[in-house]
Image (cartoon, rainbow, N blue to C red):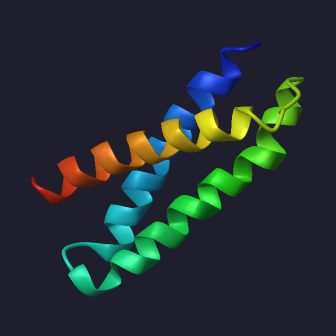
Amino acid sequence: MREVKTYLPLVMGAIAGMISFLITGNLRGRDGLAIIILFLFIYLHKFLIPKFGVEIEAKDWIGISFLTISSWYILWTILLNI
C-alpha cells in the first residue's frame, strides 16, 4: 500500500491543476486562487490516505507535498500554454 503515498498525490495534483485552470483560465490576477486550490488538495491527503489503510508519518508530508505541487504545476503550466 506504499504506492498510495506516491500515486494519490500525483493524481490529486493533476486534478488540482485542471481545476485551477478551469477556475482561473487566462486571468493572471487569479493566480492566488489557484495556489489556494493546490493547498486545499494537499490538505485533503490528511483524510484520504488513511482510508486506504496507510499511516502518514511526519516525514511523509514533504514527499506528498512535493509530488502534489510538481504534478499541479506541470499540468497547470501545460494547460495555460495550450
Q: Is residue 66 toward the left or the right of residue 47 in the image?
A: left
Coordinates of residue 68 in the picture (x, y in percent): 51, 43
Residue plotted at (48% across, 54% down): 16
**Residue 50 at x, y = what percent?**
87, 34
Relative to residue 11, is residue 39 depicted above or below?
Answer: below
Question: Which residue reaches farthest bottom?
Answer: 29
Q: Quadrant of residue 14?
A: top left
Does 76 sit above or below residue 13? below
Q: Residue at x 38, y 73 (%)?
A: 23
The N terminus appears in which quarter of the rendering? top right
Q: Residue placed at 41% from the left, 48% from the top?
A: 72
Q: Quadrant of residue 19?
A: bottom left
Residue occupying image coordinates x 80% and y 47%: 46
User: Is 76 left or right of 57, judged from the image as shown?
Assistant: left
Q: Is residue 5 above or below residue 37?
A: above
In depth, the one of 11 and 32 nearer the eye is 32
Extreme front residue here? Answer: 59
Q: Nearer the viewer, residue 61 or 47?
A: 61
Q: Image check: 8 left or right of 43?
A: left
Q: Residue extending furthest left?
A: 82
Residue 48 place in picture, x, y as percent: 78, 41
Q: How many marks?
A: 0
